[in-house]
Amino acid sequence: MRTKGYLLRQGLTLFAATLVTLFLIALVWVFWLEAHVFRFMNWGTPPDLDNASRWRFILTCTAFAAIAMVIPGLLSLRLTWRLRHRYRQLLAARARSNHLAQQDALTGLMNRPWFMARLHARLDPQLEQTALLVIDINAFQAINDAYGNTAGDYALRRIAGRLNSVRAVGDPLLGRPGGDEFVVALTGALSPRDLLDQAQALLRQVQQPLVCGSGRVTLEATIGIAIAPLHATSADRLLAAAYGAMHDARNRGERILIQESCLSQAQQEDAGRAQRLRQALDHGEIVPFYQPVVSLSNRETVGVEILARWQHPERGLVPPDEFIPLIESLGLMPEMTRCLLDTAMRDSRQWPGACFLAVNITASYLEDESFTAQMAALLEAHAFPAERLEVEITENVLIERLDVVQQNLSRLHEMGVHVSLDDFGTGYSGLYHLARLDIDKLKIDRSFFDAEEIRQDNLVRLMIAMGRSLGMAVVAEGIEEERLAARLAQQGCHFGQGYLFGRPMPASALHDSLVSSTSAPLAASNLPG
Protein backbone atom coordinates (compact mmCIF):
# COMPACT_ATOMS: atom_id res chain seq x y z
CA MET A 1 0.00 0.00 0.00
CA ARG A 2 1.35 3.44 -0.96
CA THR A 3 2.32 5.75 1.93
CA LYS A 4 1.33 9.34 2.52
CA GLY A 5 4.89 10.44 1.65
CA TYR A 6 4.64 8.70 -1.70
CA LEU A 7 1.36 10.48 -2.47
CA LEU A 8 2.93 13.82 -1.51
CA ARG A 9 5.90 13.23 -3.82
CA GLN A 10 3.57 12.28 -6.66
CA GLY A 11 1.49 15.40 -6.04
CA LEU A 12 4.52 17.69 -6.01
CA THR A 13 5.78 16.11 -9.23
CA LEU A 14 2.42 16.72 -10.92
CA PHE A 15 2.34 20.29 -9.55
CA ALA A 16 5.81 21.05 -10.88
CA ALA A 17 5.08 19.49 -14.27
CA THR A 18 1.91 21.59 -14.61
CA LEU A 19 3.73 24.83 -13.73
CA VAL A 20 6.55 24.13 -16.17
CA THR A 21 3.99 23.40 -18.89
CA LEU A 22 2.14 26.68 -18.22
CA PHE A 23 5.43 28.58 -18.12
CA LEU A 24 6.49 27.20 -21.49
CA ILE A 25 3.08 27.93 -23.04
CA ALA A 26 3.22 31.55 -21.81
CA LEU A 27 6.79 31.87 -23.08
CA VAL A 28 5.92 30.59 -26.54
CA TRP A 29 2.83 32.80 -26.66
CA VAL A 30 4.55 36.05 -25.77
CA PHE A 31 7.71 35.65 -27.86
CA TRP A 32 6.37 33.86 -30.91
CA LEU A 33 2.80 32.60 -31.11
CA GLU A 34 1.03 35.89 -30.30
CA ALA A 35 2.25 37.66 -33.47
CA HIS A 36 1.24 34.75 -35.69
CA VAL A 37 -2.24 34.56 -34.14
CA PHE A 38 -2.84 38.31 -34.59
CA ARG A 39 -1.70 38.12 -38.20
CA PHE A 40 -3.83 35.04 -38.92
CA MET A 41 -6.94 36.53 -37.31
CA ASN A 42 -6.31 39.89 -39.05
CA TRP A 43 -6.29 41.75 -35.76
CA GLY A 44 -3.46 44.01 -36.74
CA THR A 45 -0.22 43.97 -34.86
CA PRO A 46 0.07 42.97 -31.21
CA PRO A 47 1.06 45.55 -28.62
CA ASP A 48 4.73 46.38 -28.75
CA LEU A 49 6.00 45.33 -25.35
CA ASP A 50 9.54 45.31 -24.11
CA ASN A 51 11.10 42.13 -22.83
CA ALA A 52 10.67 43.14 -19.18
CA SER A 53 6.90 43.46 -19.64
CA ARG A 54 6.78 40.16 -21.43
CA TRP A 55 8.66 38.35 -18.69
CA ARG A 56 6.45 40.05 -16.09
CA PHE A 57 3.39 38.67 -17.94
CA ILE A 58 4.89 35.16 -18.07
CA LEU A 59 5.80 35.10 -14.39
CA THR A 60 2.46 36.61 -13.35
CA CYS A 61 0.51 33.95 -15.26
CA THR A 62 2.66 31.20 -13.82
CA ALA A 63 2.32 32.55 -10.26
CA PHE A 64 -1.46 32.86 -10.47
CA ALA A 65 -1.66 29.35 -11.89
CA ALA A 66 0.44 28.04 -9.01
CA ILE A 67 -1.77 29.77 -6.46
CA ALA A 68 -4.90 28.46 -8.15
CA MET A 69 -3.59 24.89 -7.96
CA VAL A 70 -2.38 24.88 -4.36
CA ILE A 71 -5.69 24.53 -2.51
CA PRO A 72 -7.35 22.06 -4.95
CA GLY A 73 -4.11 20.11 -5.05
CA LEU A 74 -3.90 19.87 -1.28
CA LEU A 75 -7.57 18.86 -1.07
CA SER A 76 -7.03 16.26 -3.78
CA LEU A 77 -4.00 14.85 -1.95
CA ARG A 78 -5.91 14.69 1.31
CA LEU A 79 -8.90 13.02 -0.33
CA THR A 80 -6.67 10.50 -2.08
CA TRP A 81 -4.86 9.67 1.14
CA ARG A 82 -8.15 9.26 3.04
CA LEU A 83 -9.52 6.98 0.34
CA ARG A 84 -6.40 4.84 0.50
CA HIS A 85 -6.62 4.82 4.30
CA ARG A 86 -10.25 3.67 4.14
CA TYR A 87 -9.27 1.02 1.61
CA ARG A 88 -6.62 -0.28 4.00
CA GLN A 89 -9.23 -0.38 6.77
CA LEU A 90 -11.59 -2.28 4.47
CA LEU A 91 -8.91 -4.84 3.66
CA ALA A 92 -8.11 -5.23 7.35
CA ALA A 93 -11.82 -5.65 8.20
CA ARG A 94 -12.17 -8.25 5.46
CA ALA A 95 -9.15 -10.11 6.82
CA ARG A 96 -10.62 -10.03 10.34
CA SER A 97 -13.98 -11.20 8.99
CA ASN A 98 -12.35 -14.11 7.17
CA HIS A 99 -10.42 -14.94 10.31
CA LEU A 100 -13.61 -15.04 12.41
CA ALA A 101 -15.43 -17.06 9.76
CA GLN A 102 -12.71 -19.69 9.56
CA GLN A 103 -11.42 -20.07 13.10
CA ASP A 104 -12.86 -21.21 16.39
CA ALA A 105 -13.17 -18.20 18.68
CA LEU A 106 -12.04 -20.07 21.80
CA THR A 107 -9.00 -22.02 20.59
CA GLY A 108 -7.94 -20.31 17.37
CA LEU A 109 -8.13 -23.61 15.49
CA MET A 110 -10.16 -24.10 12.34
CA ASN A 111 -13.88 -24.23 13.02
CA ARG A 112 -16.08 -27.00 11.68
CA PRO A 113 -17.22 -25.38 8.37
CA TRP A 114 -13.72 -24.29 7.38
CA PHE A 115 -12.14 -27.59 8.43
CA MET A 116 -14.71 -29.57 6.44
CA ALA A 117 -14.13 -27.36 3.40
CA ARG A 118 -10.36 -27.93 3.61
CA LEU A 119 -10.91 -31.65 4.16
CA HIS A 120 -13.24 -31.84 1.16
CA ALA A 121 -10.55 -30.25 -1.03
CA ARG A 122 -8.15 -33.03 -0.06
CA LEU A 123 -10.48 -35.91 -0.87
CA ASP A 124 -9.49 -36.24 -4.51
CA PRO A 125 -9.41 -39.84 -5.77
CA GLN A 126 -6.28 -39.03 -7.76
CA LEU A 127 -4.42 -37.79 -4.68
CA GLU A 128 -2.96 -39.71 -1.77
CA GLN A 129 -5.12 -41.13 1.00
CA THR A 130 -6.31 -38.92 3.84
CA ALA A 131 -6.78 -40.11 7.41
CA LEU A 132 -9.15 -38.34 9.79
CA LEU A 133 -8.69 -38.59 13.56
CA VAL A 134 -11.53 -37.60 15.91
CA ILE A 135 -10.33 -36.86 19.45
CA ASP A 136 -12.99 -36.82 22.17
CA ILE A 137 -11.98 -35.69 25.67
CA ASN A 138 -13.47 -38.09 28.21
CA ALA A 139 -15.57 -36.76 31.10
CA PHE A 140 -14.68 -33.17 30.28
CA GLN A 141 -17.93 -31.92 31.80
CA ALA A 142 -16.46 -32.77 35.21
CA ILE A 143 -14.05 -29.83 34.87
CA ASN A 144 -16.91 -27.42 34.21
CA ASP A 145 -18.86 -28.84 37.14
CA ALA A 146 -15.92 -28.75 39.56
CA TYR A 147 -14.07 -25.58 38.53
CA GLY A 148 -16.50 -23.61 36.37
CA ASN A 149 -16.82 -22.83 32.68
CA THR A 150 -13.88 -20.42 32.71
CA ALA A 151 -11.57 -23.22 33.79
CA GLY A 152 -13.10 -25.47 31.14
CA ASP A 153 -12.41 -22.89 28.43
CA TYR A 154 -8.85 -22.54 29.69
CA ALA A 155 -8.38 -26.32 29.55
CA LEU A 156 -9.63 -26.45 25.96
CA ARG A 157 -7.22 -23.70 24.94
CA ARG A 158 -4.32 -25.53 26.57
CA ILE A 159 -5.24 -28.82 24.93
CA ALA A 160 -5.53 -27.10 21.54
CA GLY A 161 -2.08 -25.59 21.99
CA ARG A 162 -0.58 -28.95 22.92
CA LEU A 163 -2.17 -30.75 19.98
CA ASN A 164 -0.92 -28.02 17.67
CA SER A 165 2.62 -28.52 18.95
CA VAL A 166 2.77 -32.20 17.99
CA ARG A 167 5.09 -32.83 15.06
CA ALA A 168 2.68 -34.51 12.71
CA VAL A 169 3.39 -36.11 9.36
CA GLY A 170 1.22 -35.82 6.31
CA ASP A 171 0.50 -32.06 6.12
CA PRO A 172 -1.86 -31.97 9.14
CA LEU A 173 -5.10 -30.01 9.49
CA LEU A 174 -6.27 -29.37 13.06
CA GLY A 175 -9.72 -28.14 13.98
CA ARG A 176 -12.32 -28.01 16.74
CA PRO A 177 -15.83 -28.90 15.52
CA GLY A 178 -17.31 -27.97 18.90
CA GLY A 179 -17.60 -28.95 22.53
CA ASP A 180 -14.73 -31.08 23.82
CA GLU A 181 -13.84 -32.63 20.45
CA PHE A 182 -10.91 -32.05 18.11
CA VAL A 183 -10.24 -33.34 14.60
CA VAL A 184 -6.96 -33.93 12.77
CA ALA A 185 -6.60 -34.71 9.06
CA LEU A 186 -3.38 -36.27 7.73
CA THR A 187 -2.67 -36.72 4.02
CA GLY A 188 -0.02 -39.05 2.64
CA ALA A 189 1.08 -42.66 2.36
CA LEU A 190 0.58 -43.49 6.04
CA SER A 191 0.44 -47.07 7.25
CA PRO A 192 -1.84 -48.15 10.11
CA ARG A 193 1.25 -48.25 12.30
CA ASP A 194 2.07 -44.63 11.40
CA LEU A 195 -1.48 -43.57 12.24
CA LEU A 196 -1.42 -45.35 15.59
CA ASP A 197 1.92 -43.73 16.46
CA GLN A 198 0.52 -40.34 15.52
CA ALA A 199 -2.59 -40.95 17.62
CA GLN A 200 -0.44 -42.01 20.59
CA ALA A 201 1.54 -38.77 20.34
CA LEU A 202 -1.69 -36.75 20.37
CA LEU A 203 -3.06 -38.80 23.26
CA ARG A 204 0.07 -38.19 25.35
CA GLN A 205 -0.43 -34.44 24.97
CA VAL A 206 -3.99 -34.70 26.24
CA GLN A 207 -2.90 -36.85 29.20
CA GLN A 208 -0.42 -34.29 30.53
CA PRO A 209 -1.65 -32.79 33.84
CA LEU A 210 -3.52 -29.49 33.68
CA VAL A 211 -3.78 -26.83 36.36
CA CYS A 212 -7.45 -25.86 36.67
CA GLY A 213 -8.46 -23.43 39.35
CA SER A 214 -6.96 -24.62 42.60
CA GLY A 215 -6.33 -28.20 41.48
CA ARG A 216 -4.57 -30.36 38.93
CA VAL A 217 -6.45 -32.69 36.64
CA THR A 218 -5.36 -35.43 34.27
CA LEU A 219 -7.58 -35.99 31.28
CA GLU A 220 -8.08 -38.98 29.03
CA ALA A 221 -9.27 -39.11 25.45
CA THR A 222 -10.67 -41.55 22.93
CA ILE A 223 -9.50 -41.37 19.31
CA GLY A 224 -11.30 -42.79 16.29
CA ILE A 225 -9.58 -43.01 12.90
CA ALA A 226 -11.03 -43.37 9.41
CA ILE A 227 -9.22 -43.37 6.08
CA ALA A 228 -10.31 -42.04 2.70
CA PRO A 229 -11.00 -43.55 0.23
CA LEU A 230 -11.01 -46.85 2.16
CA HIS A 231 -13.89 -45.98 4.49
CA ALA A 232 -15.48 -43.03 2.70
CA THR A 233 -15.01 -40.74 -0.28
CA SER A 234 -16.72 -37.58 1.01
CA ALA A 235 -15.86 -35.35 3.95
CA ASP A 236 -19.18 -35.91 5.76
CA ARG A 237 -19.00 -39.69 5.46
CA LEU A 238 -15.35 -39.77 6.47
CA LEU A 239 -16.22 -37.77 9.58
CA ALA A 240 -19.10 -40.14 10.34
CA ALA A 241 -16.77 -43.13 9.95
CA ALA A 242 -14.21 -41.58 12.31
CA TYR A 243 -16.95 -40.87 14.86
CA GLY A 244 -18.11 -44.46 14.51
CA ALA A 245 -14.60 -45.73 15.25
CA MET A 246 -14.37 -43.42 18.26
CA HIS A 247 -17.67 -44.70 19.70
CA ASP A 248 -16.61 -48.32 19.08
CA ALA A 249 -13.34 -47.66 20.91
CA ARG A 250 -15.19 -46.21 23.88
CA ASN A 251 -17.58 -49.17 24.02
CA ARG A 252 -14.63 -51.59 24.01
CA GLY A 253 -12.71 -49.63 26.62
CA GLU A 254 -9.92 -48.79 24.18
CA ARG A 255 -8.16 -45.47 23.68
CA ILE A 256 -7.48 -45.62 19.93
CA LEU A 257 -9.27 -47.50 17.15
CA ILE A 258 -9.03 -47.46 13.37
CA GLN A 259 -12.33 -48.03 11.56
CA GLU A 260 -12.32 -51.74 10.79
CA SER A 261 -14.78 -51.79 7.91
CA CYS A 262 -16.67 -49.57 5.58
CA LEU A 263 -19.66 -47.66 6.87
CA SER A 264 -22.75 -49.60 7.75
CA GLN A 265 -25.95 -49.01 5.81
CA ALA A 266 -27.38 -46.93 8.66
CA GLN A 267 -24.24 -44.79 8.82
CA GLN A 268 -24.35 -44.27 5.07
CA GLU A 269 -27.98 -43.17 5.29
CA ASP A 270 -27.22 -40.75 8.14
CA ALA A 271 -24.24 -39.33 6.26
CA GLY A 272 -26.37 -39.02 3.12
CA ARG A 273 -29.07 -37.11 5.00
CA ALA A 274 -26.44 -34.83 6.50
CA GLN A 275 -24.99 -34.08 3.08
CA ARG A 276 -28.47 -33.49 1.65
CA LEU A 277 -29.27 -31.04 4.44
CA ARG A 278 -26.10 -29.06 3.78
CA GLN A 279 -27.04 -28.88 0.11
CA ALA A 280 -30.55 -27.76 1.08
CA LEU A 281 -29.10 -24.85 3.05
CA ASP A 282 -26.76 -23.91 0.21
CA HIS A 283 -29.58 -24.04 -2.37
CA GLY A 284 -32.11 -22.10 -0.29
CA GLU A 285 -34.50 -25.04 0.21
CA ILE A 286 -34.85 -24.31 3.95
CA VAL A 287 -37.35 -21.45 3.88
CA PRO A 288 -39.17 -19.41 6.53
CA PHE A 289 -42.87 -19.86 7.21
CA TYR A 290 -44.64 -17.25 9.32
CA GLN A 291 -47.22 -17.64 12.07
CA PRO A 292 -49.07 -14.45 13.04
CA VAL A 293 -48.92 -12.96 16.54
CA VAL A 294 -51.97 -10.81 17.31
CA SER A 295 -52.94 -8.30 19.95
CA LEU A 296 -55.69 -9.91 22.02
CA SER A 297 -57.29 -6.55 22.75
CA ASN A 298 -58.12 -5.68 19.12
CA ARG A 299 -57.07 -8.80 17.12
CA GLU A 300 -54.63 -6.86 14.97
CA THR A 301 -51.53 -8.63 13.68
CA VAL A 302 -48.46 -7.12 15.33
CA GLY A 303 -45.80 -9.60 14.32
CA VAL A 304 -44.88 -13.07 13.11
CA GLU A 305 -42.78 -15.95 14.38
CA ILE A 306 -40.30 -17.40 11.88
CA LEU A 307 -40.55 -21.19 11.55
CA ALA A 308 -38.28 -23.35 9.38
CA ARG A 309 -39.68 -25.54 6.61
CA TRP A 310 -37.83 -27.68 4.08
CA GLN A 311 -39.08 -27.33 0.50
CA HIS A 312 -37.72 -30.65 -0.75
CA PRO A 313 -37.59 -30.79 -4.58
CA GLU A 314 -38.95 -34.36 -4.58
CA ARG A 315 -40.82 -34.86 -1.30
CA GLY A 316 -42.40 -31.45 -1.12
CA LEU A 317 -42.79 -29.75 2.26
CA VAL A 318 -40.83 -31.65 4.93
CA PRO A 319 -42.05 -31.11 8.54
CA PRO A 320 -39.49 -29.64 10.95
CA ASP A 321 -39.37 -32.64 13.30
CA GLU A 322 -37.76 -34.65 10.48
CA PHE A 323 -34.79 -32.34 9.92
CA ILE A 324 -34.38 -29.91 12.84
CA PRO A 325 -32.79 -32.56 15.17
CA LEU A 326 -30.25 -33.44 12.45
CA ILE A 327 -29.58 -29.74 11.83
CA GLU A 328 -28.80 -29.34 15.54
CA SER A 329 -26.57 -32.43 15.69
CA LEU A 330 -24.58 -31.19 12.69
CA GLY A 331 -24.05 -27.78 14.28
CA LEU A 332 -25.86 -26.03 11.42
CA MET A 333 -28.44 -24.15 13.51
CA PRO A 334 -26.56 -20.81 13.42
CA GLU A 335 -26.21 -20.99 9.63
CA MET A 336 -29.87 -21.92 9.20
CA THR A 337 -30.98 -19.13 11.55
CA ARG A 338 -29.01 -16.54 9.59
CA CYS A 339 -30.46 -17.81 6.29
CA LEU A 340 -34.02 -17.65 7.66
CA LEU A 341 -33.54 -14.14 9.02
CA ASP A 342 -31.95 -12.96 5.79
CA THR A 343 -34.96 -14.18 3.79
CA ALA A 344 -37.50 -12.91 6.34
CA MET A 345 -36.06 -9.40 6.39
CA ARG A 346 -36.31 -9.29 2.60
CA ASP A 347 -39.86 -10.64 2.67
CA SER A 348 -40.96 -8.07 5.25
CA ARG A 349 -40.35 -5.22 2.80
CA GLN A 350 -43.45 -6.32 0.88
CA TRP A 351 -45.78 -6.39 3.90
CA PRO A 352 -48.05 -3.52 4.87
CA GLY A 353 -47.40 -2.07 8.30
CA ALA A 354 -44.38 -2.86 10.42
CA CYS A 355 -44.73 -6.34 11.87
CA PHE A 356 -41.95 -7.56 14.13
CA LEU A 357 -39.99 -10.74 13.34
CA ALA A 358 -39.51 -13.29 16.13
CA VAL A 359 -36.88 -16.02 15.71
CA ASN A 360 -35.89 -18.81 18.09
CA ILE A 361 -32.21 -18.94 19.06
CA THR A 362 -30.61 -22.10 20.45
CA ALA A 363 -28.52 -22.10 23.61
CA SER A 364 -25.30 -22.94 21.77
CA TYR A 365 -25.79 -20.07 19.31
CA LEU A 366 -26.59 -17.59 22.07
CA GLU A 367 -23.34 -18.59 23.80
CA ASP A 368 -21.35 -17.83 20.63
CA GLU A 369 -19.20 -14.74 21.13
CA SER A 370 -19.89 -13.58 17.57
CA PHE A 371 -23.69 -13.96 17.86
CA THR A 372 -24.52 -10.29 18.48
CA ALA A 373 -22.10 -9.15 15.78
CA GLN A 374 -23.82 -11.44 13.28
CA MET A 375 -27.25 -10.08 14.25
CA ALA A 376 -25.97 -6.51 13.88
CA ALA A 377 -24.56 -7.32 10.44
CA LEU A 378 -27.93 -8.70 9.29
CA LEU A 379 -29.80 -5.64 10.55
CA GLU A 380 -27.36 -3.31 8.83
CA ALA A 381 -27.39 -5.25 5.55
CA HIS A 382 -31.18 -4.96 5.26
CA ALA A 383 -31.58 -1.58 7.00
CA PHE A 384 -34.03 -3.43 9.23
CA PRO A 385 -35.03 -1.60 12.44
CA ALA A 386 -33.58 -3.39 15.46
CA GLU A 387 -36.74 -2.77 17.50
CA ARG A 388 -38.66 -4.94 15.02
CA LEU A 389 -36.47 -7.98 15.68
CA GLU A 390 -37.34 -10.28 18.57
CA VAL A 391 -35.01 -13.04 19.74
CA GLU A 392 -36.74 -15.98 21.44
CA ILE A 393 -34.79 -18.06 23.93
CA THR A 394 -35.90 -21.13 25.85
CA GLU A 395 -35.43 -21.76 29.52
CA ASN A 396 -32.64 -24.29 29.00
CA VAL A 397 -30.23 -21.47 28.08
CA LEU A 398 -30.38 -20.45 31.74
CA ILE A 399 -28.77 -23.69 32.90
CA GLU A 400 -25.23 -23.27 31.56
CA ARG A 401 -22.94 -20.30 30.94
CA LEU A 402 -25.40 -17.80 32.36
CA ASP A 403 -22.72 -15.11 32.39
CA VAL A 404 -22.17 -15.36 28.62
CA VAL A 405 -25.92 -15.43 27.96
CA GLN A 406 -26.43 -12.35 30.12
CA GLN A 407 -23.67 -10.49 28.29
CA ASN A 408 -25.11 -11.27 24.86
CA LEU A 409 -28.65 -10.36 25.95
CA SER A 410 -27.37 -7.02 27.24
CA ARG A 411 -25.70 -6.35 23.90
CA LEU A 412 -28.94 -7.15 22.09
CA HIS A 413 -30.77 -4.65 24.29
CA GLU A 414 -28.17 -1.99 23.56
CA MET A 415 -28.82 -2.59 19.85
CA GLY A 416 -32.58 -2.22 20.42
CA VAL A 417 -33.48 -5.88 19.83
CA HIS A 418 -36.25 -7.35 22.00
CA VAL A 419 -35.87 -10.65 23.87
CA SER A 420 -38.64 -13.09 24.78
CA LEU A 421 -38.57 -16.20 26.96
CA ASP A 422 -40.26 -19.00 25.00
CA ASP A 423 -42.19 -21.96 26.49
CA PHE A 424 -42.24 -20.24 29.88
CA GLY A 425 -43.19 -22.54 32.73
CA THR A 426 -41.93 -25.79 31.20
CA GLY A 427 -38.23 -25.60 32.02
CA TYR A 428 -35.66 -24.20 34.40
CA SER A 429 -36.08 -20.57 35.36
CA GLY A 430 -36.93 -18.49 38.37
CA LEU A 431 -37.72 -14.96 39.41
CA TYR A 432 -34.00 -14.45 39.96
CA HIS A 433 -33.28 -15.09 36.28
CA LEU A 434 -36.22 -13.03 35.06
CA ALA A 435 -35.11 -10.06 37.13
CA ARG A 436 -31.43 -10.42 36.25
CA LEU A 437 -31.72 -11.01 32.51
CA ASP A 438 -32.95 -8.47 29.95
CA ILE A 439 -36.25 -10.19 29.12
CA ASP A 440 -39.00 -8.15 27.45
CA LYS A 441 -41.66 -10.78 26.91
CA LEU A 442 -42.91 -14.09 28.35
CA LYS A 443 -44.44 -16.71 26.07
CA ILE A 444 -46.66 -19.10 28.04
CA ASP A 445 -46.48 -22.64 26.70
CA ARG A 446 -49.63 -24.12 25.15
CA SER A 447 -49.59 -27.05 27.60
CA PHE A 448 -51.09 -24.73 30.23
CA PHE A 449 -54.23 -24.31 28.11
CA ASP A 450 -54.92 -27.97 27.34
CA ALA A 451 -57.06 -28.58 30.41
CA GLU A 452 -60.03 -26.72 31.85
CA GLU A 453 -58.84 -27.14 35.41
CA ILE A 454 -59.27 -24.33 37.90
CA ARG A 455 -55.74 -24.79 39.22
CA GLN A 456 -54.38 -24.56 35.67
CA ASP A 457 -56.34 -21.38 35.03
CA ASN A 458 -55.13 -19.85 38.29
CA LEU A 459 -51.56 -20.68 37.32
CA VAL A 460 -51.99 -18.89 33.99
CA ARG A 461 -53.44 -15.86 35.81
CA LEU A 462 -50.42 -15.88 38.11
CA MET A 463 -47.95 -16.00 35.23
CA ILE A 464 -49.71 -13.15 33.44
CA ALA A 465 -49.75 -11.05 36.60
CA MET A 466 -46.09 -11.82 37.27
CA GLY A 467 -45.08 -10.82 33.74
CA ARG A 468 -47.03 -7.57 33.93
CA SER A 469 -45.58 -6.75 37.35
CA LEU A 470 -42.06 -7.15 35.92
CA GLY A 471 -42.90 -4.84 33.03
CA MET A 472 -42.95 -7.66 30.48
CA ALA A 473 -45.40 -8.36 27.70
CA VAL A 474 -47.14 -11.74 27.86
CA VAL A 475 -47.91 -14.00 24.88
CA ALA A 476 -50.12 -17.08 25.00
CA GLU A 477 -49.14 -19.83 22.57
CA GLY A 478 -51.31 -22.51 21.01
CA ILE A 479 -54.65 -20.67 21.06
CA GLU A 480 -57.18 -22.62 18.98
CA GLU A 481 -60.54 -21.57 20.46
CA GLU A 482 -62.24 -18.19 20.60
CA ARG A 483 -63.36 -18.58 24.21
CA LEU A 484 -59.75 -19.16 25.31
CA ALA A 485 -58.63 -16.01 23.49
CA ALA A 486 -61.41 -13.98 25.12
CA ARG A 487 -60.60 -15.33 28.58
CA LEU A 488 -56.88 -14.58 28.20
CA ALA A 489 -57.62 -11.04 27.02
CA GLN A 490 -59.83 -10.54 30.07
CA GLN A 491 -57.01 -11.80 32.31
CA GLY A 492 -54.63 -9.18 30.91
CA CYS A 493 -52.63 -11.23 28.40
CA HIS A 494 -51.25 -8.91 25.73
CA PHE A 495 -50.71 -11.12 22.69
CA GLY A 496 -51.84 -14.46 21.32
CA GLN A 497 -50.54 -16.99 18.83
CA GLY A 498 -52.11 -20.16 17.48
CA TYR A 499 -54.24 -21.78 14.80
CA LEU A 500 -57.18 -19.55 15.73
CA PHE A 501 -55.30 -16.59 14.24
CA GLY A 502 -53.40 -18.40 11.51
CA ARG A 503 -51.31 -21.45 10.76
CA PRO A 504 -47.66 -21.13 9.67
CA MET A 505 -47.72 -19.88 6.08
CA PRO A 506 -45.30 -18.83 3.33
CA ALA A 507 -44.50 -15.18 2.70
CA SER A 508 -46.94 -14.82 -0.19
CA ALA A 509 -49.88 -16.14 1.85
CA LEU A 510 -49.00 -13.86 4.78
CA HIS A 511 -48.83 -10.87 2.45
CA ASP A 512 -52.29 -11.65 1.05
CA SER A 513 -53.63 -12.13 4.56
CA LEU A 514 -52.28 -8.78 5.75
CA VAL A 515 -53.51 -6.93 2.67
CA SER A 516 -57.02 -8.42 2.85
CA SER A 517 -57.29 -7.80 6.60
CA THR A 518 -60.07 -5.41 7.49
CA SER A 519 -57.71 -3.43 9.71
CA ALA A 520 -54.09 -2.74 8.92
CA PRO A 521 -51.49 -4.40 11.11
CA LEU A 522 -49.99 -2.37 13.89
CA ALA A 523 -46.94 -0.34 13.02
CA ALA A 524 -45.94 0.17 16.62
CA SER A 525 -43.66 -1.64 19.04
CA ASN A 526 -44.32 -5.24 19.87
CA LEU A 527 -44.32 -4.31 23.53
CA PRO A 528 -47.32 -2.85 25.31
CA GLY A 529 -47.28 0.87 25.81
Image (cartoon, rainbow, N blue to C red):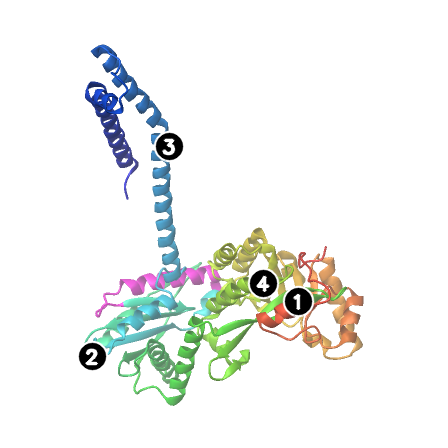
Q: Residue at x 24, y 14 (%)?
A: 54
Q: Earlier in the sequence, mark 3 or mark 2?
A: 3
Residue 407 locus on image (x, y percent): 54, 55
What amino acid type is highlighted by mark number 2?
A: Ser
What secondary structure is found at the residue carrying circle 1?
A: helix
Label 1 Cα neighbours within 10 Å, binned few <14 / some 14-19 / many ≥20? some
Q: Which stretch is magenta?
A: 145-172
**Along the horizontal axis of the image, is 32 left or right of 75?**
left
Membership of 169 in magenta stretch: yes
Which amino acid type corresponds to the residue marked 3 in the rendered image?
A: Leu
Q: How far apart in space, not on screen, are marks 4 and 3 (Cα)?
A: 44 Å
> Between residues 387 and 441, which one lies in front from this camera angle?
387
Give me the C-alpha separation between circle 4 and circle 2. Answer: 60 Å
Residue drawn at (41%, 75%), measured in percent from left and top? 279
Which numbered tag is attached to residue 71?
A: none
N-terminal label among 4 and 1: 4
Q: Determine which residue is flagged by label 4.
A: 350
Tell me how far mark 1 sits from mark 2, CA to CA. 65 Å
Quarter-of-image position of residue 180: bottom left
CB-based contact (under 8 Å), mark 3 and mark 1: no
Disc 3 target residue: 75
Observer-side mark, 4 or 2, equals 4
Mark 2, secondary structure of its residue: loop
Residue 210: quadrant of the picture: bottom left
Residue ID for mark 1: 514
Residue that badge 2 annotates: 191
